[in-house]
Image: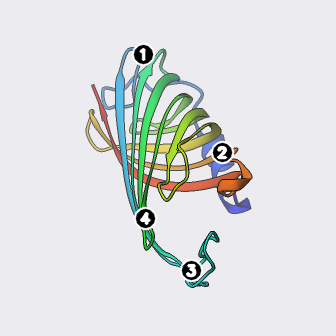
Amino acid sequence: MTCRSLCLLLLLVGCASPKRTSSRDDWNPKAGDNVIQAFVRYVYADNEGDDDVAEGETPTGLDQEALTVDTDFGYFLSDRSELGFSLDGIWINNEIDDSYTGAAGVFYNLNFALGPRTTLYVGPEVLWVRLDSGGGVDKVDEIAYGGRIGLRFWFTPAVSFLVEPSYLFTPYDDDIGGDQDQFTFKLGVGVKF
């Protein structure tokens, strides 16, 4: 997280009202509400490097494209406390083979009403990650952990736009690339019911 992002976060948290508004226009989730959030990302990487390598070595210049679908299902235990689970899928296509990474996990968010139609949320996340990279590499199962922070902007009492930066650490073995730090910035849509 950059210094600029941290300053913005502190500003947003500092501006949060310590009490909830009782207005009819308060569209933020309440205890007992369910929220489904969906994020879709497409990434194309035109990597520079050496495509021609000896057998058994990994090329460094492969062009890759990836499609990521992240879905979160949250339940509000109280106006500020959200517990949920997530299902994520990443499909990667490169010049050698295709691979798939799936993840399932749990998260806990603390929610802060910044206004009657804006919610800031922050919390930890733990994921079980399954990597199936093809090309002779066995399936790999790992536990990843990290945190997320996000904003929900409610357009209607049931539909919101989401902005979510997150961090995830996955301890992969050295033979498949080693530990992985992943910083992600996601945009998505949420539905409350």
Crowding around mark 1 (Cα neighbors within 10 Å: few <14, some 14 to 19, many 20+) is few
**For the residues bearing labels 2 and 3, Cβ distance under 8 angstroms:** no
Mark 2: secondary structure: strand
Judge whether 82 appears above or below 96 on screen: above
Residue on which the image places disc 1:
31
The x and y percentages for residue 190 are: 34, 39
Q: Say few, some or many: other residues with alpha carbon within 10 Å of mark 4 (under 14 / 14 to 19 / 20 or more).
A: few
Image x and y of residue 162, in percent:
41, 47
Residue 55 - label: none
Residue 173 horizontal/vertical position (percent): 71, 48
Do residues under tags 4 and 3 come within 8 Å of each other at their CB atoms? no
Instruction: Mark 2 and mark 1 in contact? Answer it, CB < 8 Å.
Output: no
Look at label 4 and name its amino acid.
Asp
| Mark 2 burial class by Cα count in 10 Å: few <14, some 14-19, many 20+ | some
Q: Quadrant of residue 95?
A: bottom left
Residue visible at 67% across and 47% down? 172
Of 61 and 87, which appears nearest the observer?
A: 61
- The local secondary structure at tag 3 comes to loop
Viewer-nearest residue: 55 or 170: 55
Which residue is drawn at the image coordinates 67% and 45% (left, top)?
169
Real-space CA distance between mark 1 and mark 3, rounded to the nearest whole angstrom: 50 Å
Question: Mark 1 near mark 3, Cβ–Cβ under 8 Å?
Answer: no
The residue singled out by tag 4 in the image is 97
Sequence-earlier tag: 2 or 3: 3
Q: Nearer the viewer, mark 2 or mark 1?
A: 2
Question: Hey, what amino acid is under mark 2?
Answer: Thr
Left or right: where 155 falls relative to 75: left
Work out whether mark 4 precedes mark 3 in sequence or the reverse, and give the earlier one.
3
Q: What residue is pinned by disc 2? A: 170
Distance from Cα at disc 2 to Cα at disc 3: 23 Å
